[in-house]
Image (tube, rainbow, N blue to C red):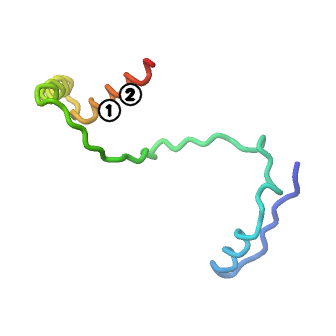
Amino acid sequence: MKKPLNMPPVSNNDQEHDFWSNVNLADYLEAENFESAIFPNLKPTSQPINLRLPIYLLYQVKQRANSLNVPYQALIKQFIADGLAKR
């Protein structure tokens, strides 16, 4: 157990910023004291990409997505994720 963190009273953001800028949290925290956190509403960031597909393949994906009642881009993402999971 490391020493407890005693934050001094602060009256503005600058004082708080100065405190957190100069403190080394490794002096106060132990790895075994951490707990897992779950953020159910947090969405992973997405990066747009350009992908060239033959038109017949795109039509097939769109038809399959329509039959499953899902957006075709979501279906493409699922296909990619499934393919990566198999490897």
Q: Quadrant of the C terminus?
A: top left
| Residue 34 location (% of width, % of height) | 72, 44
In the foreground, 62 or 1: 62
> Hey, which quadrant is residue 16 in on the image?
bottom right
Q: Is residue 38 left or right of residue 69?
A: right
Residue 29 versus residue 86 in the image, above or below: below
What's the amino acid at mark 1? Lys
- Residue 77 numbered tag: 1
Label 1 crowd bin: few (<14), some (14–19), many (20+), radius 10 Å: few
Viewer-closest of 47 and 54: 54
Q: Give the residue at x 77% y 44%.
A: 31
Give the number of the disc on residue 46. Answer: none
Q: Secondary structure at mark 2?
A: helix
Q: Which mark is residue 81?
A: 2
Whether label 1 touches label 2, CB < 8 Å: yes
- Where residue 5 appears, as percent x and y from the top left, is 81, 61
> Which residue: 56% across, 41% down?
38
Q: Secondary structure at mark 1?
A: helix
Given residues 71 and 87, the one toward you in this image is 87
On the image, which quarter does residue 7 sit in?
bottom right
**Could you say which is closer to the camera, residue 26 or residue 9?**
26
Residue type beneath disc 2 = Ala
